[in-house]
Amino acid sequence: MAYRIAVLPGDGTGPEVIREGLKVLGAVAEATNFKFETAEYDFGGDRYLRTGETLPDAALAEFKEMDAIYLGAVGHPKVEPGILERGILLKIRFDLDQYINLRPVKLYPGVWTPLKDKGPEDIDFVVVRENTEGLYRGEGSFSRKGTSDEVAEQKMVNTRKGVERCIRYAFQYAQERGRKRKLTLCDKANVLTYAHDLWRRVFEEVGGEYSDIKKDCAFVDAVCMWMVKNPEWFDVIVTCNMFGDIITDLGAMIQGGMGIAAGANINPEGTSMFEPIGGSAPKYTGKNMINPLAAISAAQMMLQHLGEKRGAHLMEEAIVKACQKVKSLSAGKMGYTTTEVGDMVAKFVRGAE
Ligand code: IPM
Ligand code: MG
């Protein structure tokens, strides 16, 4: 049986990095004996500008039948911010109920980090970001819009079920990961006295079932501080949608930048989506300069999720080797082109067999 993967290269440098990810996936499939087929979709800014369409329901229905979705990037300089993000990326996350956004923050050996005196043993944690609720629901209102008395409200919607399934996933994840066996709840319960009171109560309650996991609560501002000062304190962090968005960009920076950071949008019972977390990087489009390692890492997470353990392991080893070869993880400074980095990782995959 072959895995069926929906491929959405998307905007900007998305297609360039996805091409390399698929190249490496092909090499891994050959080396470890699995098959996959891809169905490519051209959703993104260009299609929107041409047809006015972001993502039709028919496509969503097709995605639900797939084993995974592999996404490049959405975001187009000629499209007003929000249209593609809401119309494509968030629509997939919400409609497919991908309620976990899993974002590893792992510094590979030889990769430069802006944190002085910190190394791979210090920077190795995972952020479990709630992915379908909170401020991202898009609920809110304007009143007296355009006047000097305008009020704009944006609701942070947290459901008991939504919070619980996320926290439960995080505890489970901390247990299976088995590294420090520690889960940190990142919130702002001192200010968000309704929304994050719920998070605290659920954390406490569900935590009761995981006596082997150390529990810790920290306010989001302090988490930012510790991520820079003592990242080794973290093992797994669980947090709401908005805070997860913010702290994972900080996380990406301490693990070497957007050139390496990947994420998984997971529905444990449905179809999940894998993506590099950096954007579409319009200024590098078509230049063969962007780093494809984040997209390759996203494909690696996809294999992990599909249960291709050997392939995922092989792929990670190859990524680690490539990290040691490139001069920098930043676009244009790698000492290699986008295509060459993809070729290199594919070669490492083949060589390891
Ligand atoms: C991310 C991105 C998205 C988010 C944007 C593009 C809507 O920043 O995946 O982190 O905020 O979730
Ligand atoms: Mg983000």
Image (tube, helix red, strand yellow):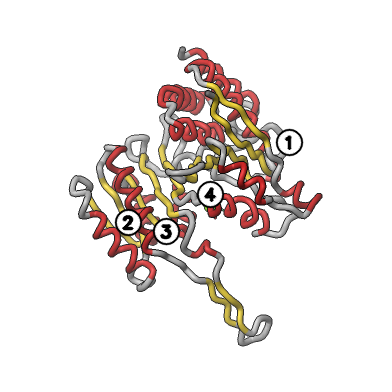
- Callout 3 secondary element: loop
Rendered position, 316 above or below 179: above
Residue located beneath label 4 in the image = 96
Mark 4 C-beta closer than 8 Å to ligand 1: no
Q: Quadrant of residue 244?
A: bottom left
Label of residue 286 in the image: 1
One can see residue 71 in this view: yes
Q: Earlier in the sequence, mark 2 or mark 3?
A: 2
Q: Quadrant of residue 113?
A: top left
Residues at marks 4 and 3, CA–CA distance in whole angstroms: 18 Å
Rendered position, 248 above or below 4: below
Q: Earlier in the sequence, mark 2 or mark 4?
A: 4
Label of residue 240 in the image: 3
Q: Earlier in the sequence, mark 1 or mark 3?
A: 3
Front-most of 262 and 307? 307
Residue located beneath label 2 in the image = 185
Residue pictured at 65% horizontal, 48% vertical: 74
Mark 1 residue type: Gly
Residues at marks 4 and 1, CA–CA distance in whole angstroms: 31 Å
Mark 2 residue type: Leu
Front-most of 12 and 201? 201
Q: Classify mark 2: residues with Cα within 10 Å, few (<14), some (14-19) or many (20+).
A: many
Residue pictured at 49% horizontal, 45% vertical: 265
Q: Position of residue 96 (x, y in %)?
A: 53, 49
- Callout 1 secondary element: loop
